[in-house]
Image (spheres, coloured by chain):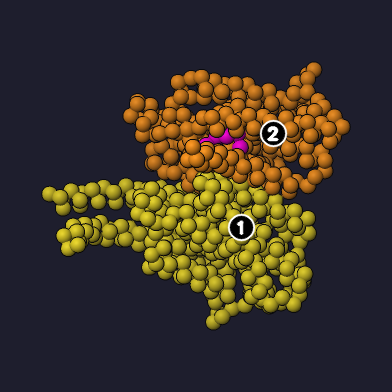
Chain colours: A orange, B yellow
Amino acid sequence: MRNLLRWETALVFLLIVVALTGQVSTDGSFLSGGNLFYLGLDIGEIALIALPLTLVIVAGEIDLSVASVLGLSSALIGWLWNAGWSLETILPTVIVAGAVCGAVNGLLVTRLGLPSLAVTIGTLALYRGLALVVLGDTAVADFPASYTSFGTTPVPGTDIPYPIVLAAVLAVLFGIALHASSFGRSVFAIGANEEGARFSGIRVKRVKLSLFVLAGAVAAIAGIVYTFRFSSARADNGVGLELAVVAAVLLGGVSIFGGRGSLFGVLAGVLLLGGLRNLLILQDTSTEVLTIVTGLLLLVSVLAPSVTRRVGSLRKAAQ
Amino acid sequence: MTTQLTPAVTPPARRTAARRLTTRVGRVRELGIVVALALVVIPTAIVNPRFIQPQSLRDLLLNASIVALLAVGQTLVVITRNVDLSVGSVLGLSAFLTAQHFADNPGTPLLLGIGFGIAVGLACGLLNGLLVALGNVPSLVVTLGTLYVFRGIDYALAQGKQVNAANLPDALLDLGSSRVLGVPILVLVAVVVIVVAAVYLRSYRSGRELYAIGSNPEAATLAGIPVAKRTLTTFAVSGLIAGLAGALWVARYGTVDAAAGTGLELQVVAAVVVGGVAIFGGSGTVTGAALGALLLGTITSCLVVLQIPAFWQQAIAGALLLSAITVDRLLALRLAKALRTSEGTSHA
């Protein structure tokens, strides 16, 4: 637990360092309202998906299919729009479809006892494939401006993009669910010791299933955001995003073995990755540097606790 | 000594029935892939007889050989209850560096250049292995991290350039297209690697120890198996094979940029899982994994021949993976039940 707290402190420290370096090196434009607006837009989908994925990983499972659900929901929006549906009916339908995708993952994991890593690699291909089947390689872009402006204009009077408002509201809900409810405590219990959780009366399968459903539904919402932000429904929207989201969650100090982590850390992780990316773009640094930095941060985030543990035990041995 | 020997002999005798059942199920697994292959190939061949002409069969094997190679390395890693997500990036880095090495040094002997690619892969694999084995860190996270790092280095070194076939020696390009006794050389290389790995896993002590590590890491440590050393070796071998695959990628495709092999890791893991290697370690064969790679590649080709829109390919590959692990699981449940009953009778 202490290691975890230390890691979150380190994350906040890193965030401040990035912000200050950005501010100095860009002559104050990094923390300007306009730039923060773009930063917010840039991390919207990752922030959204990272929320339920944190719960899934804390419960000791993983969902690699989230980016494919995002793509499938984007493809569905385009397909149903072409079929003449109104957006008021399309959007709830798409979210339900995302929840169904999550339920398929969850049922395969909980009812058949299959490892979630294998299941969601399978559905990663399946859902992306279905997206391609639905929409092919065409793009649908003729959405009404009232919807697409959702992704391109800030909340009136501020510099806050709408997706960030959405993510913030969901973050509060997920934060309460994980850290201040019996549901959240059972999620931690399952991740720490599944058998122990079952014997203490927690409905392990039901909790896990609900987490996968949540991940699917939120990934579909992220798909809606993505579609309107780029004003383009395509089957290949968000390809490869799953790795970025998993990286952000793990960077936020969530243990891949489950049972440990906090939503605060994850949000700091998302901000850190987004901030770095934004800073590098502002400085015209090539994006490959960002790729390397993402990877290194991820490695440091998992190595740090292990190294501090080892140093600690060495120190204990010396005494 | 003799008194200690007697109880040690009896349990294996009782276990043989169970083991026979296990091997039979294992064989059924590989047979299942062969049947699935037949189910895919025969209808396609009926619709379009040209599909089973030697040339297209050769292409089939050729297309699957690189993924099959990577699947062999991945199998070694997955058997020890780890995973190597960085293989696509290692392949990309090795492919680009090999191509650039050949382009910059036109006189490089063929094997030396390929050896260079293998060395790049080995270095990447050693780094993965050291982080996992010594850092005591989950391999999923480590190799996700190095997936980014290696790909980033690849892009940084390439700086948007690509190496074209015109800058590569003919000997290398011939390697990608020439044949020995009608079999493409790339396929032969893949077969040799598969056979070596299969014999190693089957008949060598350290090979068997990999299964022990995957079945129960704690027990393996207590039994005196050098877990860290074996883990390091599997990652090094996986990297080495990915390096070799990178060099062969250059030979096969001729044109290489920094994006070579992007996303390949998921195909490889899919092939391994379809091939019957348990993702939680302890069971599976390289032959199965290679057959898994062949099956996935064949399905892709069949869809093209059957003129099914390419859009269906990914969905079908995903559905296939899911049904493979589901069938596996159901078989395992039945096996466990059968073992329990057979044990019950022998006790009674």
Crowding at mark 1 (Cα within 10 Å: few <14, some 14-19, many 20+): many
In the image: residue B69, left or right of residue B198: right
B138 is higher (above) or lower (below) than A73? below
Residue for badge 1? B124
Type of the residue with mark 2: Leu
Of residues B85 and B137, the one nearer the viewer is B137
Residue at the image position 35 percent from the left and 54 percent from the top: B223
| Residue with the mark numbered 2 | A14
Parent chain of label 1? B
Q: Position of residue B162 (x, y in %)?
A: 76, 61
At mark 2, the secondary structure is: helix
Position of B105 relative to B18 (above/below): below
Residues in magenta, as a range: A251-256
Q: Local crowd at mark 2 within 10 Å, few (<14), some, or many (≥20)? A: some
Above or below, B143 relative to B291: above
Farthest residue to the top: give it: A157
Could you tell me if residue A148 is visible in this image?
A: no
Let me know if residue A253 is in the magenta part: yes
Task: Find residue B331 and report its horizontal and vertical position in percent.
Answer: 34, 51
Disc 2: host chain: A
Q: Nearer the viewer, residue A129 or B124?
A: B124
The image shows residue B107 at horizontal and vertical percentages of 74, 77
